[in-house]
């Protein structure tokens, strides 16, 4: 029988994060250079420092949309590209940055299908020709940490308008690539999460059409790094981070509410809505506060992650304690 970990997020809150990242980067750098177990010299240290620099993705420029800025300073690109959740690569925060190289992002197609008048398979280069803009969003993980990230992308509504959802379409399902050759975490018997593959997430159609919902192809003026969900991921800033599925190959319009991977794994912990809500705790920890990566004091978590003015009206009459 397979030994499987509990279907939960792991917490690295226990280890001082700077030490943790520093140590993991050092080991990753040494391994990349084929030097693990070698003698540490000054020359080696400077080589490792080079190797540990932010990944130099291809530049991707897009004008910043002034309607989507944030009061808090941006996180460093090093934070956003080295402290990731992407269980297809493993459950540790540094696994996606370490192992992300096995994901091949070309050629890449995205099928947009289901209850639509004009289903279409898009090539990634066609998606990159949508009018791109930069938007600064907060990403709030259900593990109670957050980052402020400048994303580059276009509203999902622009894509959905092209395929013309039918009147029976009520939900949108997002499906991540399923390929154990590229994602070690999807290999049978991999000792990691107990998620069902492929990773599936979903939104109600009105949430999907909301102007904040961004299909994302870049960040920090670069093409999206693999660990952040290259080449195409969704970002839904008023919901916990796990709703923002990475490396998407299929967008499907449905009449029924999609069964998401996290709901299947632990329905009592992760609901379909997963709106950031400081007044509804996770059964095992509080959601009232969060730690901004790179800081040590805790901040108060804001209703809908600070986007209440824009999205609260989507949930009028919905019991947010019941529909967590
Ligand atoms: N396919 C896939 N998408 C995923 C995840 C994952 O494990 N697999 N993790 C989610 C979680 S829990 C978070 S917090 C965000 C993190 O995005 P980032 O690494 O770009 O900050 O990605 C989300 N999207
Ligand atoms: Mo998360």
Image: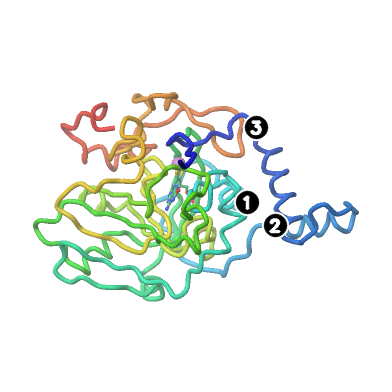
Residue drawn at point x = 20 percent, y = 46 percent: 257
> CB of mark 1 within 8 Å of CB of mark 3?
no
Q: Secondary structure at mark 3?
A: loop
227 displayed left or right of 64 = right
Going from N to C along the chain, the mark reached first, 1 or 3, is 3
Q: Is residue 259 visible?
A: yes
Going from N to C along the chain, the mark reached first, 2 or 3, is 3
The residue carrying pointer 2 sits among few (fewer than 14), some (14 to 19) or many (20 or more) residues within 10 Å by Cα, namely few
Give the residue pinned by disc 2. 53
Disc 2 under 8 Å from ligand 1? The reply is no
299 displayed left or right of 171 = right
Give the residue pinned by disc 1. 78
202 displayed left or right of 49 = left
Residue drawn at point x = 35 percent, y = 31 percent: 269
Residue drawn at point x = 30 percent, y = 36 percent: 271
Measure the alpha-carbon separation of dots 1 and 2: 8 Å
Residue found at the very far front of the displayed protein: 1
Residue 79 at what x, y percent from top left? Answer: 60, 47
134 displayed left or right of 98 = left
In the picture shown, does residue 278 fall above or below 261?
above
> CB of mark 2 within 8 Å of CB of mark 3?
no
Measure the alpha-carbon separation of dots 1 and 3: 18 Å
Give the residue pinned by disc 3. 15
């Amino acid at each position: 029988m397979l030994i499987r970990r509990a279907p939960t997020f792991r917490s690295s809150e226990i280890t001082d994060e700077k030490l943790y990242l520093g140590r993991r980067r050092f080991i990753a750098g040494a391994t990349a250079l084929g030097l693990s177990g070698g003698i540490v010299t000054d020359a080696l240290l400077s080589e490792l420092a080079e190797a540990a620099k932010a990944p130099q993705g291809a530049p991707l420029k897009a004008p910043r949309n002034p309607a989507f800025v944030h009061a808090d300073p941006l996180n460093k690109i090093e934070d956003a590209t080295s402290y990731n959740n992407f269980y297809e690569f493993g459950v540790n925060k540094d696994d996606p940055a370490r192992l992300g190289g096995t994901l091949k992002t070309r050629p890449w197609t995205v099928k947009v299908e289901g209850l639509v008048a004009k289903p279409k398979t898009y090539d990634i280069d066609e998606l990159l020709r949508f009018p791109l803009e930069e938007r600064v969003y907060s990403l709030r993980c259900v593990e109670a940490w957050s980052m402020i990230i400048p994303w580059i992308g276009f509203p999902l509504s622009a894509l959905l308008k092209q395929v013309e959802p039918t009147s029976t379409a009520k939900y949108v399902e997002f499906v991540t690539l399923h390929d154990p050759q590229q994602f070690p975490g999807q290999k049978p018997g991999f000792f990691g999460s107990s998620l069902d593959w492929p990773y599936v997430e979903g939104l109600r159609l009105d949430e999907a059409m909301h102007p904040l919902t961004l299909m994302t192809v870049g960040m920090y003026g670069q093409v999206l790094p693999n660990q952040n969900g290259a080449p195409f991921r969704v970002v839904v800033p008023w919901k916990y981070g796990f709703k923002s599925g990475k490396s998407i190959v299929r967008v499907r319009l449905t009449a029924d509410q999609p069964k998401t991977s996290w709901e299947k794994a632990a329905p009592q912990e992760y609901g379909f809505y997963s709106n950031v809500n400081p007044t509804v705790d996770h059964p095992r920890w509080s959601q009232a506060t969060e730690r901004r990566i790179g800081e040590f004091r805790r901040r108060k978590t804001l209703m809908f992650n600070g986007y209440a003015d824009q999205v609260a009206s989507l949930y009028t009459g919905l019991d947010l304690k019941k529909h967590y």
